[in-house]
Image (cartoon, grey):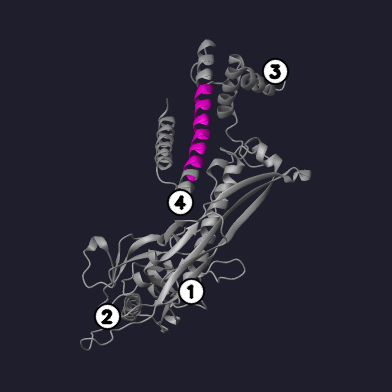
Amino acid sequence: MSKMLDSLKESRAAKAAEASDLLAGEASAEALAVIEARNAEIAQLDGQISAVEATEARAAVMTEARVSAGVTGSAVVKSEPMTYSERGERSFVRDLINAQVRNDPSAWSALQRHMDEVRVETRDVSRIDGGIGEFVPPLWLVDQYAKTLRPGRTTADLLSKQALPAGTDSIVIPRITTGTDVAAQTGDNVATTTQDMVTTSVTAPVRTISGYENVSLQLVEQSPLAGGIDRMIFADLMAAYDYRLNVAVINGVGTAGDLTGLLNTIGIGTVTYTSGTPTAAEFQVAFAKALSTVAKNRYMGAEAIVLHPSIWYGLVGLSDTAGRPVVVPAANGPMNAVGVNGAPGAAQGPVGNILGVPTYLDAAIPAVSTALPAIVAAFSDTYLFESGMKTRVLPDVLSANLTIRFQLYGYAAIAARYPAGIAKITGTGMNPVTGY
């Protein structure tokens, strides 16, 4: 067994073990997505393993045939005729068929001898089309296809995730806006303090997120992609679902079937940072104001800050008046730093902290006017209800055209229980600096 085959099998075993561990754990949309991804990777590895095993088997048969025929070393052609000459008795196509279909040792030996002859005698022939280059076909690494580039669901995963209850199109959560009160009794036998509660409610309409891809039956049945073209399409639809849900969680407008995102929730705090040339000191003040907004209105500290990568790396690139960076890698033992870079080069997810508050990157944050707003919040206050992704294969919709529809959909609702626990930083100071 080759080192390549050993490596592929070890990788497959590791991914299978990870998928098995997830299956044994608690069910969630995130776990199901990871399991699906691991299954796709396992199917891809199975195809690679089969290809390597087939190649090794053919090589073993060819070696055995060469030994049986007494052929050793490379062929040296002097005055002997070529194996496949114009007037020769052997046919290249016939040997190719006999070797691949019937596993004929004599055919394998002739083909190997021909390869040796070509290396010796026709070394000046190039692979350029017209110079017999057409006989060198392109190799399509379909199993190694490059997936669509999309940011993940960083912000959505910071919320309190709940299973969406069945049988409803909206979720209503009561909220007390004015509570009871107490005070010192001014004297014996006099009235004590009373204050009636005032309540309202938070309504989270259930929204549908869906998409589909129409594919010809021929593509499904004849594609050589390991695991099938269907696995590739569903994997892409799942990634698109996560991306669109995350965008809606951040900036959904709440109408036309959209969720109401954090930035558009009524009652959140706003810090306007206006600056044409942002400085480290100004950034520090803006983030401190947002943290103060959450603390004084929610009476609870902000749990995290979410930034667009352009804003974070613009901050990383700033220096103080002495030329010292204001965001320092954690390994440097930072002192008096505005921020700490705990994951240098990160594109999404946890990256470090600003003013000691955990900071995350999310490239799905959209530009509002020209600014890329930051979100400072007690994210666990907001509930994200999800049904999980559902998939369907519909062969009958366009059956007259031999077309199959692959469809994915799911239901979600978002409820910001305490809008006062959310603050956004916007304004011209949050415009991305050129180059970032």
Real-space CA distance between mark 3 and mark 4, rounded to the nearest whole angstrom: 64 Å
Real-space CA distance between mark 1 and mark 2, rounded to the nearest whole angstrom: 38 Å
In the figure, residue 177 lies in which quadrant? bottom left
Asked whether the residues under the numbered discs 1 and 4 touch, taking CB atoms below 8 Å apart as contact, a structural biologist would say no
Q: Position of residue 13 (x, y in %)?
A: 41, 34
Asked whether the residues under the numbered discs 1 and 2 touch, taking CB atoms below 8 Å apart as contact, a structural biologist would say no
Question: Of the residues under marks 3 and 4, which one precedes in the sequence?
Answer: 4
Q: Tell which residue pokes out farthest to the right in this image.
A: 400
Name which residue type carries label 4: Glu
Question: Of the residues under marks 1 and 2, which one precedes in the sequence?
Answer: 1
Real-space CA distance between mark 1 and mark 3, rounded to the nearest whole angstrom: 82 Å
The secondary element bearing badge 1 is classed as loop
Residue 47 covered by magenta stretch = yes
Real-space CA distance between mark 2 and mark 3, rounded to the nearest whole angstrom: 84 Å
Which residue is at the front of the view, 428 or 105? 428
Residue carrying label 4: 30
Asked whether the residues under the numbered discs 3 and 4 touch, taking CB atoms below 8 Å apart as contact, a structural biologist would say no
Residue carrying label 1: 265
